[in-house]
Image (cartoon, rainbow, N blue to C red):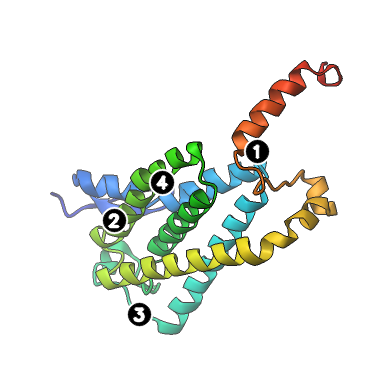
Amino acid sequence: MSNQLRAITLTHVRYFKGDQLGHFLAWVSLVPVFIGLGGFVSHFLFRRELQGMFFALGILISNFINEVIKASVQQARPETCIMLEMCDSHGWPSNHSQYMFFFATYLTLLTYKKMGIMFRKQMLLVGLVVWPLALLTMYSRVYLGYHTVAQVFVGAGLGVFLGGLWFWVVNSLLIEFFPAIEESFFGRWFYVKDTSHIPNSLKFEYDNARAARRHASYKR
């Protein structure tokens, strides 16, 4: 394996040239970017669900807390930060680990809350895809030299805690304001909606879309 470093130029995640595992983990390390840009942005454009919006807001708050802690603790990254040109930033706790474990925790609780036949299958997907991705992301940050083992474990633990806490805040306190947000100028202008009260929102939308196709007022 060569000591020459290469980078995924879009985000500058470095790995050793010729290291196939490192190359794979470099892409795994970008999963939070894909979730943020591909997942939440697409969700707002095409779904506009309040639950998804507050999910994204929680991740932003989690990232802010991570930056505050890093600036306060100021724990250095491992010595490999010299090769990675990352020594000017702090490593405790790992933001990638915190992000992914927040995401996995919130999504697990949200899926469990809507448990039906369809969502049992979705829970299986969460268990077989989302949590392994979270663990792989945590491992990638150590393997690629961006963090120590302690830094990624603290990030993961903080992500689980904040994910669970934010889920409780949203679904026990803030959910009471969802109808008001729907009826507000913002909600009506952007067609923001809440389907938390619908057991199977996909079936509901499917049935209504088919019914609308048969209704004369919807025909072009």
Disc 1 to disc 2, how far (Cα)?
32 Å
**In the image: residue 131, left or right of residue 211:** left
Does the rendering let one see residue 7? no
Residues 128 and 84: in front is 128
Residue at mark 3: 75
Q: Say what secondary structure mark 3 lies in.
A: loop
Residues 20 and 41: in front is 41
Residue at mark 1: 46
- In the rendered structure, which amino acid carries the disc numbered 1? Phe
- In the rendered structure, which amino acid carries the disc numbered 4? Val
Q: Say what secondary structure mark 4 lies in.
A: helix
- In the rendered structure, which amino acid carries the disc numbered 3? Gln
Which is more N-terminal, label 3 or label 4? 3
Disc 3 to disc 1, how far (Cα)?
41 Å
Q: Residues within 10 Å of mark 3 (few under 14, many from 20)?
A: some
Disc 4 to disc 3, how far (Cα)?
33 Å
Q: Residues within 10 Å of mark 2 (few under 14, many from 20)?
A: many
Q: Say what secondary structure mark 2 lies in.
A: helix
Residue at mark 4: 126
Which x, y percent locates residue 173? 66, 67
Q: Say what secondary structure mark 1 lies in.
A: helix
Disc 2 to disc 4, how far (Cα)?
20 Å
Residues 50 and 100: in front is 50
Q: Residues within 10 Å of mark 4 (few under 14, many from 20)?
A: some
Disc 1 to disc 4, how far (Cα)?
22 Å
- In the rendered structure, which amino acid carries the disc numbered 2? Ser
Which is more N-terminal, label 4 or label 2? 4
Question: Which residue occupies the extreme left position in the image?
Answer: 1
Which x, y percent locates residue 21? 21, 46
